[in-house]
Image (spheres, coloured by chain):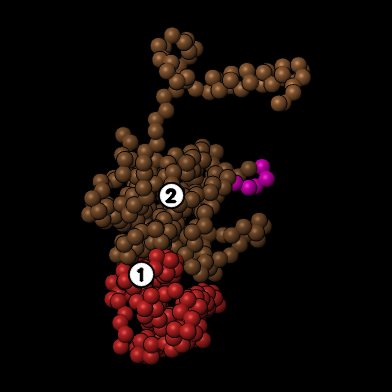
């Protein structure tokens, strides 16, 4: 027989009551019917369950199509801005050809998506637009920006690199080898667009390969920036110079899980 | 480990890169080049060296050490005539882009396909820049009508 002192007995009974209260607070008691008589202050938020998504070949193709529309929108904005004049008039000609290419690419990848039983996607990637393109355009078109014309070319160059990297990146993710080849067949043309725009931004044969800024040590824009196609993030430097001479640098990344165009994603009006 | 199919395809890719390496080696030795032209072409040459060596590493004991001689001789003839240098180099790069892309259709390993894709995007950039050396016509820089190279 265990002999308990009066003090130990009181401590033990106190602990039992406390644990009982905790358990009671944790959930409904068995056999007790909820008659909604307990008052709740305020509204409890309704949580929408996350869609059950899968990154399929069709999702990757629809995402690629969305980037093509981002590119088309970028060139449309560039042409409508009337900034591509003077020395940059040739870029306006390039923009028209590149837009046609992007439309053809979008049609091609949408056709492949449809072949897989998915729906086509005929609008820009909203997350890419919200996170990268819209903020970049806001900085570029600021009235005090003296570099707006060349900055819009820099944005187009970044978008082309983004598209080239996206196609290169999905090669490893696509399950069908034929689709991998189709992807890089388009991606290599985006890389050509980027190379030609790089020569507008940093002209001359000496600048085709990688070089760096003598003052800042940062890499300059290059038509052929590396030995192998890079999948690293893309730096876009734009906007009016700050007092120290530096400018805003945005970092662009290829679509990830939160920006893929899943089966349930529809174009936003 | 590489499958038999992938080994065969990569072996052919390595042969092509060895051929491109040797052709660029010939071109950078030309006295008619300007300093900037030589610098750029030396860079492109070094890229093909890197591709060949990467494929060599992947293939291991199955690697090939010989270029494709008939291809080399055919292009060498074109490269020997100064006015044809840029057009011939453009043709080489476009042919490599087409051939490597075609090989991705049959390569079984996704990782190997990704490696070839990372080569294709740079060779396409080479082609675009080489096209600007002879013409301002955008189509020449953007469109690739070269056929797939085959073993002869």
Seen in the image, is B104 located left or right of residue A222? left
The residue under label 1 is B108
Seen in the image, is A19 located left or right of residue B26? right
**Residue at the image point whose x is 58% and y is 45% from the top:** A248
Which color was chain A given?
A: brown
The residue under label 2 is A255
Percent from the top left, x then y, of residue A37? 43, 9
Q: How many marks?
A: 2
**Looking at the figure, which quarter contains the C terminus of chain B?**
bottom left
- Whether residue B131 is visible to the viewer of this picture, yes or no, is no
Looking at the image, is mark 1 or mark 2 nearer the viewer? 1
- Whether residue B54 is visible to the viewer of this picture, yes or no, is yes
Percent from the top left, x then y, of residue A32? 43, 15
Which color was chain B given?
A: red
Percent from the top left, x then y, of residue A10? 72, 16
**Looking at the figure, which quarter contains the N terminus of chain B?**
bottom left
Q: Residues within 10 Å of mark 1 (few under 14, many from 20)?
A: some
Whether labels 1 and 2 share one chain:
no
Q: Which residues are magenta?
A: A243-247
Q: Residues within 10 Å of mark 2 (few under 14, many from 20)?
A: many
Q: CA distance from mark 1 to mark 2?
A: 25 Å
């Amino acid at each position: 027989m265990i002999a308990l002192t009066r003090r130990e007995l009181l401590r033990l009974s106190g602990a039992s009551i406390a644990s009982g209260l905790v358990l009671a607070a944790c959930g409904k008691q068995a056999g007790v019917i909820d008659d909604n008589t307990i008052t709740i202050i305020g509204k409890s938020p309704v949580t929408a369950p996350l869609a059950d998504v899968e990154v399929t070949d069709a999702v990757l193709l629809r995402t690629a199509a969305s980037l093509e529309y981002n590119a088309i929108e970028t060139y449309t904005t560039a042409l409508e801005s009337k900034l591509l004049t003077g020395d940059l008039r040739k870029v306006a000609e390039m923009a028209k050809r590149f837009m046609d290419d992007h439309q053809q690419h979008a049609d091609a990848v949408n056709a492949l998506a449809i072949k897989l039983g998915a729906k086509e996607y005929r609008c820009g990637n909203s997350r890419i637009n919200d996170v990268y393109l819209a903020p970049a355009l806001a900085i570029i078109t600021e009235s005090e920006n003296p570099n707006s014309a060349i900055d819009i070319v820099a944005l187009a160059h970044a978008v082309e690199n983004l598209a080239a990297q996206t196609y290169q990146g999905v090669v490893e993710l696509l399950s069908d080898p034929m689709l991998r080849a189709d992807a890089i067949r388009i991606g290599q043309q985006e890389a050509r667009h980027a190379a030609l725009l790089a020569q507008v931004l940093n002209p001359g044969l000496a600048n085709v390969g990688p070089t760096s800024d003598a003052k800042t040590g940062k890499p300059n824009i290059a038509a052929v920036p590396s030995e192998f196609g890079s999948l690293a993030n893309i730096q876009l430097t734009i906007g009016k110079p700050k007092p120290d001479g530096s400018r805003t640098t945005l970092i662009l990344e290829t679509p990830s899980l939160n920006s893929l165009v899943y089966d349930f994603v529809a174009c936003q009006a | 480990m590489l499958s038999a199919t992938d080994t065969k395809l990569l072996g052919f890719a390595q042969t092509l890169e060895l051929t491109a390496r040797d052709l660029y080696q010939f071109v950078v030795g030309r006295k008619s080049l300007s300093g900037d032209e030589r610098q750029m072409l030396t860079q492109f040459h070094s890229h093909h060296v890197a591709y060949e060596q990467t494929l060599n590493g992947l293939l291991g004991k199955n690697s090939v050490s010989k270029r494709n001689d008939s291809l080399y001789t055919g292009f060498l003839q074109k490269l020997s005539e100064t006015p044809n240098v840029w057009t011939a180099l453009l043709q080489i790069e476009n042919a490599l882009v087409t051939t490597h892309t075609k090989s991705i259709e049959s390569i079984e390993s996704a990782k190997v396909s990704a490696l070839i894709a990372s080569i294709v995007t740079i060779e396409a950039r080479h082609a675009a820049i080489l096209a600007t050396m002879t013409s301002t016509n955008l189509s020449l820089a953007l469109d690739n009508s070269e056929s797939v190279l085959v073993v002869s």
